[in-house]
Every structure is written in structure tokens, then in C-alpha cells.
Amino acid sequence: ACTGLIDILLSGMPQSRIEAAAALAKLSGEGAVMTQLVETPGTYSAIINMLGLASPVASEAAAALIYRLSLRRPCRDEIGATSSCIEELTAVLDKGSLVAQALAGGALLNLMDSPDNQARLIDSANVLNVLLRLGE
């Protein structure tokens, strides 16, 4: 079942992708699901791209998946290196629902455990400006 959901996440119709991400987020407590997400090429990008969608369901599911993935220390560098991950998480902190904000904040904190991700954060003036503004 998990393989089918990941296939839909990667190549399904837009609404089907959102539904697959929401289902995967509900299953994300299972180690086998997380392992399959980590091992399937393209899943990080697909999930990160969902953060910016207008749908609260999409951004909450994506933030939940990134948070759960970020709990795995070996995944942190790769997640942070995925195109616009840190920027998208910061945008959710700025404009997402309260649930998405909490999950994105937790994911960002976990990702900052990596020196490479710390450097990415420092290199992104937009991210720093949002974080400073939110901290006021």
C-alpha cells in the first residue's frame, strides 16, 4: 500500500498527490513507511514542492512528512540540500496554518543540527529576514 501511495505522490494528479501525502503523513510513525520514503528517489522534492501549495491539507501533510523525516539524523543533510527546502519551510512558518507552522518549525530545528544546513540558512538572506521578523 505504501508503494502505491508514494507512486501517487510522485506522479499522480494534483489532488491525488495531496491525498497521498496526507495518508503517508498518517502512516509516518511506521518505520517501514519512512524507510521507503527515504529510499525512493524524488520523494523529498515532491514533498517540499507541496509546502508552497495554497491547500492547508497539502502544506500540513508535507510539513508533517518533512518533520518526521528530519527526526532521522542521516536524512538531515539531504533534506536540507533539496532545492528550496529551508526557504519553503520558512515560508510555512510565515504564512502557514498553525499546525503547518509547528511542524515546519520542528523540522527546521532538526535540520539545523547539520553544519551544511546551518550554512544554507546563513546564505539565505530571505530566510534570515523572515526568522528575525517572526522573532520580534
Image (cartoon, grey):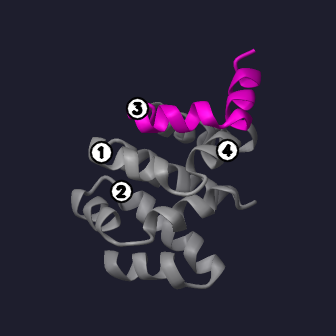
How many numbered callouts?
4
- Judged from the image, the secondary structure of the residue bearing numbered disc 2 is loop
Is residue 35 in the magenta section? no
The residue segment tinted magenta is 110-136
Note whether 112 is above or below 68 in the view shown.
Answer: above
Between the C-alphas of marks 4 and 3, the distance is: 22 Å
Return the residue found at the far top.
136
Q: Give the residue drawn at x 53%, y 68%.
A: 46
- Judged from the image, the secondary structure of the residue bearing numbered disc 3 is helix
Query: What kind of residue is marked 2?
Result: Ser
28 and 66: which is toward the camera: 66
> Can the viewer see residue 3?
yes
Give x and y (percent) for residue 95.
75, 42
Nearer the camera: disc 2 or disc 4: 4
Q: Which mark is residue 28?
A: 2
Q: Give the residue at mark 3.
A: 115
> Can the viewer see residue 1?
no
- Whether label 1 touches label 4, CB < 8 Å: no
Q: Earlier in the sequence, mark 1 or mark 4?
A: 1
